[in-house]
C-alpha cells in the first residue's frame, strides 16, 4: 500500500513542478482575467447589483434618448390602438385527442351535476305538517 501511495505522490509532485504546467496555469489565469466582464458587466464591488453595472456602462457611451414630442406620443398611441383592434391570431392549436379528452371530462362533470327540476307537489301532506307545527310550537299555559 505504501508503494502505491508513494508512487502517486511522486507523480503529482512531478506534474506540479514542471515548467509547462506553470505556463499553462498562468495562461489560464490570464484568459480568465480577460474574460472578466464578458458574461456580466464588470461591477465596482461584489455587492453592486448587475443591473446597476449595466446601467452605468450604458450611460457612459450610449446615445441619450430625447423626450418624445406630443406628435410622436399620439402616433404611438394610435399604433397601439390599431394593434389592439386587429383580430388575435391563434397561436396554439391543441391536439385533437387532447381536445376530445377535455370534452369528455367536461361531459362527465356535467353528468354528475344534478338536474334543476321543479319541486314536485304533494311530497308533504300539508294538513299533517300544520298539525305537527301546532303541536311543536304550541304555547302552553
Image (spheres, rainbow, N blue to C red):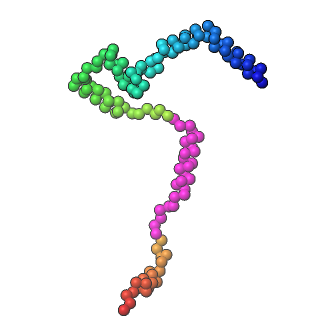
Magenta range: 93-119
Image quadrant containing the C terminus = bottom left
61 sits left or right of 14 in the view:
left
4 sits left or right of 37 in the view:
right
Q: Quadrant of residue 64?
A: top left
Residue 15 vertical position relative to residue 71 in the rendered view, above or below: above
Does residue 2 appear in the picture of this structure? yes
Is 112 within the magenta? Answer: yes
89 sits left or right of 108 in the view:
left
Residue 89 vertical position relative to residue 69 in the rendered view, above or below: below
Count the marks.
Answer: 0
Residue 1 position in % (x across, y down): 78, 24
Which residue in the rendered view is the most extreme toward the bottom? Answer: 141
- Residue at position x 57%, y 43% from top? 100
- Residue at position x 36%, y 25% from top? 52
Looking at the image, which is closer to me, 26 or 33?
A: 26
Q: Quadrant of residue 61?
A: top left
Looking at the image, which is closer to me, 72 or 99?
A: 72
Looking at the image, which is closer to me, 117 or 44?
A: 44
Is 37 within the magenta? Answer: no
Residue 15 position in % (x across, y down): 66, 13
Residue 110 position in % (x across, y down): 52, 54
Amino acid at each position: 500500500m505504501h508503494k502505491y501511495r508513494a508512487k502517486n505522490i511522486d507523480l503529482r509532485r512531478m506534474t506540479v513542478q514542471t515548467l509547462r504546467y506553470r505556463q499553462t496555469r498562468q495562461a489560464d489565469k490570464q484568459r480568465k482575467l480577460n474574460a472578466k466582464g464578458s458574461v456580466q458587466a464588470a461591477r465596482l464591488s461584489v455587492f453592486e447589483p448587475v443591473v446597476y453595472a449595466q446601467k452605468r456602462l450604458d450611460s457612459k457611451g450610449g446615445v441619450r434618448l430625447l423626450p418624445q414630442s406630443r406628435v410622436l406620443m399620439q402616433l404611438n398611441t394610435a399604433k397601439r390602438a390599431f394593434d389592439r383592434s386587429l383580430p388575435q391570431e391563434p397561436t396554439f392549436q391543441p391536439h385533437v385527442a387532447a381536445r376530445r379528452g377535455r370534452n369528455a371530462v367536461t361531459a362527465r362533470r356535467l353528468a354528475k351535476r344534478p338536474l334543476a327540476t321543479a319541486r314536485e307537489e304533494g311530497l308533504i301532506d300539508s294538513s299533517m305538517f300544520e298539525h305537527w307545527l301546532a303541536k311543536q310550537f304550541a304555547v302552553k299555559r
